[in-house]
Image (cartoon, grey):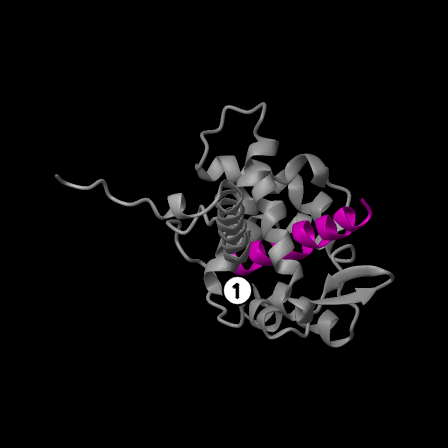
Amino acid sequence: MMKNKRNIFNDYPTMNKAFFAVLLSLILSLNACQRGPEYRFQDEPKVVSCSEMSEDFMHELLYSFREDVGAFYNQYTDYIKGSRSYYFEAYGQYVYFGFSGTARFDDIASDHSRALLQELRKEKDFWIIKNKQERLNYNHPYLICLIDGIADDDLRLALQNLRQAKSLTPELIAETMRINVQKVISDPNLSMYLALDGFYQPLINRSAKK
């Protein structure tokens, strides 16, 4: 007669089985936390080529930001999601308020962007404390690469000079970026700079107050 296959859990008391079940659940949870947020936009074209940070992670940051502002500012428009007009409408309305720190960040930011932000906060060299707030460290190699790669000569030189003089702040350049919104949309480096200094940076400080 064929014997039934042995279930190893039958060799342990009920209490031990419960313990192993809890332990397995804890291990799976820890592994999930270590992996970080799930990436959703890796099929989109890679547009920024600065290798000083994980390109996949920074790519995810950019596209999550883009979709957040796109969804928020097109709630009452007829623009097709993914079209140039859809993002032009969103960026056109957002750029000034993002850099000036007056956008409705809590309403705009998705849970996905917030989860990515928490991962970004772990990059300690990416931030400095200035006026009791976490601000971008413009001397970080990634940010140097990002700013030095801006296509427009005037905007690139302006940001480089402000960085060198230690005077660069998003608030200071808000109006300049508003005037040059078309360049922000068309230049991936400027779009990434907007995402970092005009979205995640103010969002990180709003989150810190809660």
The 10 Å Cα crowd at callout 1, few under 14, some 14 to 19, many 20 or more, is: some
Give the labeled residue for mark 1.
Answer: 151
Instruction: Identify which residue, 129 or 95, lies in the foreground.
Output: 129
Q: Is residue 205 magenta?
A: yes
Residue 61 location (% of width, % of height): 55, 53
Residue 156 location (% of width, % of height): 61, 67
Stretch in magenta: 188-210
Q: Is residue 107 magenta?
A: no
Image vertical order of residue 13 relative to residue 148, above or below: above
Image vertical order of residue 165 relative to residue 206, above or below: below
Point 65% across, 63% down: residue: 122
What amino acid is labelled 1 in the image?
Ala
Secondary element at image label 1: loop
Return the residue found at the far left.
Answer: 1
Return the residue found at the far front.
Answer: 1
Left or right of residue 85, residue 173 in this image: right
Quarter of the image where one finds residue 132:
bottom right
Asked if residue 187 can be seen in this view, the reply is no
Return the residue found at the far right.
Answer: 131
Image vertical order of residue 81 relative to residue 205, above or below: above
Instruction: Identify which residue, 49 or 171, lies in the foreground.
Output: 49
Left or right of residue 93, residue 48 in this image: left
Residue 126 location (% of width, % of height): 66, 67
Quarter of the image where one finds residue 162:
bottom right
Q: Give the dominant element type of the magenta stretch: helix, strand or loop.
A: helix
Point 61% across, 68% down: residue: 143
Image vertical order of residue 84 relative to residue 55, above or below: above
Instruction: Identify which residue, 16 or 53, lies in the foreground.
Output: 16
Left or right of residue 78, residue 163 in this image: right
Quadrant location of the C terminus in the rendered image: top right
Asked if residue 130 can be seen in this view, the reply is yes
Point 64% across, 54% down: residue: 118
